[in-house]
Image (tube, helix red, strand yellow):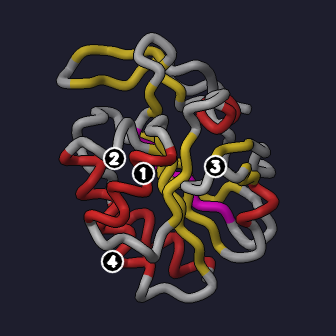
């Protein structure tokens, strides 16, 4: 794994990340998160299609909510693609958010228990126990094809960058 800058910012204030993100061309590391029904979900459960893994600090914030809704709208237009939004929110809060926002085309997954995803993908902001705003695109074989760490976590990701890579792979 190549080292990454050890920080992102929140409102211009630097925040350290727990480690390097997987590099493009590398087999994606496994993780275990929770589905909204508290069932464990691993990378193996999500593979077989192009996979978008978007980590966000919390779905109960404006920017994270906008991002997840944007990806939900785009998911309906994509083929051979699965999209998941991962946060440290409790599964119950994620389900409530998804129901309130009529979001059903993406998975919402919780990393609250062990921060397995955050640690494996180098996006855990340990002092806040939140995930950095990051989008990983994996091909059908589970190889990382795009790593998009948003430098300022109050900004939305570059949707076109992500969606162009997804369309190229699907």
Sequence order check, earlier mark of 3 and 4: 3
Give the number of the mark in front: 3 or 4: 3
Q: Residue furthest top?
A: 127
- Circles 3 and 4 in contact, beta carbons < 8 Å: no
Q: Are marks 1 and 2 in contact (CB under 8 Å)?
A: yes
Q: Is residue 112 left or right of residue 45?
A: left
Going by the image, does 169 lie left or right of 88?
Answer: right
- Asked if residue 137 is among those painted magenta in the image, a careful observer would answer yes
**Distance in Å between CA atoms under marks 2 and 4:** 16 Å
Q: Earlier in the sequence, mark 1 or mark 2?
A: 2
Residue highlighted by disc 2 = 59
Q: Residue at (47%, 21%) from the top-left corner?
A: 129
> What label does residue 94 carry, if any?
1
Secondary structure of the residue carrying numbered label 3? loop
Helix, strand or loop at mark 2: loop
Quarter of the image for the C terminus: give it: bottom right
Determine whether, in the image, residue 84 is placed left or right of residue 169.
Answer: left
The answer to whether mark 2 and mark 4 are in CB contact below 8 A is no
Q: Assign the magenta stretch its main secondary structure.
A: strand
Residue linked to disc 4: 73
According to the picture, the residue beneath numbered tag 3 turns out to be 38
| Disc 2 crowd, CA 10 A, few/some/many (<14, 14-19, 20+) | many
**Image marks 2 and 3: residues in contact by CB distance under 8 Å:** no
Q: Nearer the viewer, mark 2 or mark 3?
A: 3
Horizontal and vertical percent position of residue 43: 75, 55
Q: Position of residue 164 (x, y in %)?
A: 44, 74
Closer to the chain start, of discs 4 and 1, is 4
Of callouts 1 and 3, the N-terminal one: 3
Q: Which region of the structure is painted magenta?
A: 133-138
Does the magenta run of residues contain 158?
Answer: no
Q: Is residue 29 above or below residue 88?
A: below
Helix, strand or loop for disc 1: helix
């Amino acid at each position: 794994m190549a080292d990454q800058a050890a920080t992102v910012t929140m409102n211009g204030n630097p925040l350290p990340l727990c480690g390097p993100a997987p590099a493009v061309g590398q087999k994606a590391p496994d993780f275990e998160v929770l589905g909204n029904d508290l069932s464990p979900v691993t990378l193996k459960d999500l593979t077989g299609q192009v996979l978008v893994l978007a980590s966000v600090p919390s779905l109960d914030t404006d920017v994270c909510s906008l991002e997840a809704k944007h990806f939900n709208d785009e998911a309906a237009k994509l083929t051979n693609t699965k999209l998941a939004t991962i946060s440290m929110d409790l599964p119950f809060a994620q389900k409530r958010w998804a129901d309130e926002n009529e979001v059903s085309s993406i998975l919402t997954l919780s990393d609250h228990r062990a921060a397995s995803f955050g640690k494996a993908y180098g996006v855990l902001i340990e002092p806040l126990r939140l995930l950095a705003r990051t989008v990983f695109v994996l091909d059908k074989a589970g190889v990382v094809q795009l790593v998009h760490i948003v430098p300022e976590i109050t900004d939305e990701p570059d949707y076109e960058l992500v969606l162009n890579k997804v369309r190229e792979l699907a």
